[in-house]
Image (spheres, rainbow, N blue to C red):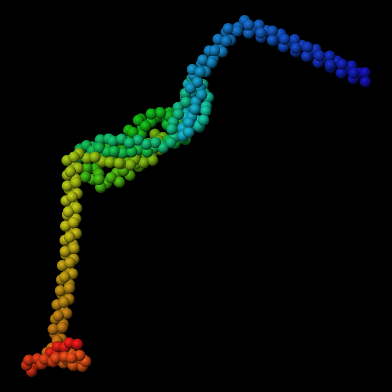
Amino acid sequence: MKTIRERLGAVSASLEKAMKFAGEGLDNLGRRSGAFMKRHALSLISFGLLFCLVVVFFFNQIVISIHPGELGVLWRRLGAGTVIDTVYQEGMHIILPINKMYIYSMRKQQYSESIDVLTVDGLTVRVKYTARYYLDKDNLPLLHQSVGPDYVNVAVRPDIRSVIRTLFGQFKPEEMYTSQKAIQLRVSEQSKIRLAARFVTLDDVPIEGIILPARISEAIESKMVQQQKEGEYVYRTSIAIKEADRLRIESAGLKLYNDTVNQSLTPSILKWHGIQATQELAKSANAKVVVIGAGDQGLPLILGRE
């Protein structure tokens, strides 16, 4: 028992010494810190103010907000440049002020414009179109690295214009009206292929209008009117031919019928039918006047009334 008490007393004494030493160390640290603060108070205040000014001045370069429908691509000045494997989502992001965040809209976008194209005949035609497109988030860093934020003017507009000028240059002005749907389909297909190589997804390129020179437009309109008239004449002629065929067939039928009847109606048959008709009239209960026909071959003519 005595040994245990002695050991407990020794442990307590050691703890008291340790706590006393720690207290003296804290007191010394406090006195030294206080002395340091007193000696360098102006420098510390100046540093704090400078730090606050830097944070306020570079706040927009440090705290980045990505709004709904947008994604970000980070460029590191001291790193490997464009970060290819990461696309920054919506929300707030904190970056170093020496780096830069490029923000792209991921919503479907469109623009409309009119351009002049040359036909196969060398005539100038104005084409109005609308382009609808959007970006693929998986390829957004590659788009930023190869094309850049001004991708509309660098890739979308030039490629679509080139396709339109190439395709419209294969047609004559009068063919553009009749082949407009086919041309529009080919413009969309070829533009999609070109922009896919630029990491832009094209939705559609509807052709909204084709404006020809006034004299060409008048000539085409006159030609179409003549074609309509020609078609009307052809239709009327076909109706007249069909009507003539019908009348010819009907006449042939009537002639055949009359020939058949004439061959079968002999004088004896006619006289026999006349006698039968006279007998039927004579049997009628109505009052009647009988007039005997002239000649020995004449049949009685009976006129009657109620």
Residue drawn at point x = 38 percent, y = 40 percent: 203
Report x, y in % for residue 204: 36, 41
Is 113 drawn above or below residue 287 in the view shown? above
Q: Is any part of residue 24 visible from this angle? A: yes
Left or right of residue 119, residue 103 in this image: right
| Total numbered circles | 0
* Quadrant where the C terminus is found in the figure: bottom left
* Residue that appears at 17% across and 60% down: 236
Question: Which sits in the foreground, 45 or 113?
Answer: 45
Q: Residue at x 84, y 17 (%)?
A: 11
Q: Quadrant of residue 273?
A: bottom left
Residue extending farthest to the left is: 295
Q: Give percent across and percent down for residue 293.
A: 9, 91
Across and down, in percent, residue 19 comes to 78, 14
Residue farthest bottom in this picture = 296
Quadrant into which the N terminus falls? top right
Residue farthest to the right?
1
Asked whether, in this view, residue 252 is left or right of residue 204, the answer is left
Q: Is residue 14 above or below residue 168?
A: above
Residue 269 appears in the picture as rendered: no
* Residue occupying the point 14% across, 85% down: 263
Closer to the camera in the image, 121 or 98: 98
Is residue 72 found left or right of 242 in the rendered image?
A: right
Q: Quadrant of residue 292?
A: bottom left
> Vertical placement of 56 versus 143: above or below?
above
Q: Which quadrant of the figure has residue 245?
A: bottom left
Q: Position of residue 234 (x, y in %)?
A: 17, 58
